[in-house]
Amino acid sequence: MFDVGFWELGIIALVALVVIGPERLPKVARSVGRWVGSGRRLISALKEDIEKEIEVEELKQMVQKETRGNVVEELVGDVHQTVGELNRDTQKIMNENRKAFESDNEEMLEPEKNDGK
């Protein structure tokens, strides 16, 4: 972030020593150190929170994609099941009609056989 080298820090320390004085400089240095430390912890916590939020968003997107895929698969399965049921019902109706047709034909043919005897 800041590109501060050794010489810049030395100049800042010398100016602080002159402005603040040697008696209060250790207390001020400790306070500045605490502020810098708490600032770093705050920035670190913010980075972690942002990373967690990004991870949560990515997981939500993955779940949505997976859910959409599952819905399509379920729909395809339901369609296949419905088509299978329709085929079975159609076959059942055709078999019933065939049997009814055959029994009607037999009934129609029986009187002709009885007449011939």
Image (tube, rainbow, N blue to C red):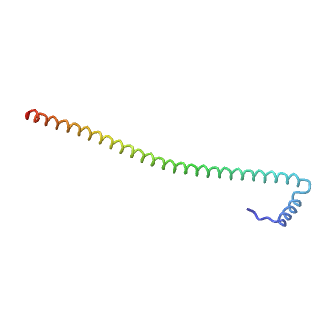
Side of 61 where 3 appears, left or right: right
Side of 73 where 38 appears, left or right: right
**What's the residue at 21%, 36% (across, down)?**
100
Q: Quadrant of residue 101?
A: top left
Q: Which of 52 and 84 lies nearest the eye of the viewer? A: 84
**What's the residue at 84%, 67% (across, down)?**
7
**What's the residue at 58%, 49% (across, down)?**
59
Q: Which of 105 and 59 lies nearest the eye of the viewer? A: 105
Residue 54 in percent (x, y) is at 61, 52
**What's the residue at 13%, 37% (across, down)?**
109
Q: Which of 56 and 94 lies nearest the eye of the viewer? A: 94
In the rendered image, which quarter contains the N terminus?
bottom right
Side of 25 where 40 appears, left or right: left
Q: As displayed, is residue 91 above or below residue 61? A: above
In the rendered image, which quarter contains the C terminus?
top left
Residue 111 in percent (x, y) is at 11, 33
Number of labelled discs?
Answer: 0
Residue 65 in percent (x, y) is at 51, 51
Q: Quadrant of residue 21?
A: bottom right
Outermost residue on the bottom side: it is 7
Side of 30 where 68 appears, left or right: left
Residue 28 in percent (x, y) is at 85, 53
Outermost residue on the right side: it is 23
